[in-house]
Image: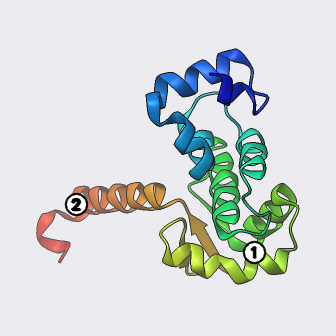
């Protein structure tokens, strides 16, 4: 608890972290602080980012950029969007992270290779789009189920 409060966390958030991770909490905060934003209610990207900075994570680390991109895609999902055009994702990611867009453009393929984001080209779209991997899988599953309903199992190939 003392360790978590040394990061400036309110008691309520420190308690949530301890309940979630137990004795592993300190190690997770030091080594994987961005997990907190994804897994602990009430921990925003900004709070996790502040904790990461205190733990020595560089502002231009691929890990930080991945967490920022995932946050932007998660926010879009919260607004009802399964994917985002990469152009908009890069703009919003650069604003959230306070990094040059070019740096994110260069890093995005690495994030795709690491499974942080899924990149695709849609017919008729002006450019590539990006998904969170879970949302891409869900969309594929729904599309396959709809095809089965429309065409029957024999025609799916």
Q: Residue furthest left?
A: 154
Q: Position of residue 141 (x, y in %)?
A: 33, 58
In the rendered view of the protein, which quadrant contains the C terminus?
A: bottom left
Residue 17 in the image, given as x and y percentages of width and height: 56, 28
* SS type, badge 2: helix
Looking at the image, which residue is at 62% across and 47% down?
A: 30
Q: Is 50 in front, or is 74?
A: 50
For the residue pair 40 and 30, the one nearer the viewer reads as: 30
Circle 1 or circle 2, nearest the eye: 1
Does residue 67 sit above or below 88 in this rendering?
above
Q: Position of residue 6 (x, y in %)?
A: 75, 30
Q: Is residue 65 visible?
A: yes
* Residue at the image position 79 percent from the left and 29 percent from the top: 8
Q: Is residue 59 left or right of residue 108?
A: right
> Where is the N terminus found, in terms of image quarters?
top right
Q: Locate residue 102: give its quadrant.
A: bottom right
According to the image, label 1 marks what residue? 104
132 over 14 or under it: above or below: below
């Amino acid at each position: 608890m003392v360790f978590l409060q040394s990061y400036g966390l309110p008691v309520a958030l420190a308690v949530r972290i301890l309940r979630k991770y137990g004795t592993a909490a300190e190690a997770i905060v030091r080594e994987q602080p961005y997990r907190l934003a994804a897994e602990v209610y009430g921990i925003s990207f900004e709070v996790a980012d502040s904790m990461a900075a205190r733990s020595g994570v560089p502002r231009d680390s691929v890990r930080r950029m991945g967490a920022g991109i995932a946050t932007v895609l998660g926010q879009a999902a919260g607004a009802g969007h399964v994917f985002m055009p990469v152009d908009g994702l890069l703009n919003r990611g650069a604003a959230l992270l306070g990094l040059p867009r070019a740096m994110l453009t260069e890093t995005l393929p690495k994030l795709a290779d690491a499974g942080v984001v899924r990149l695709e080209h849609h017919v008729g779209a002006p450019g590539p789009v990006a998904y969170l991997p879970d949302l891409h899988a869900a969309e594929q599953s729904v599309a396959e189920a709809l095809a089965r309903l429309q065409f029957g199992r024999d025609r799916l190939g």
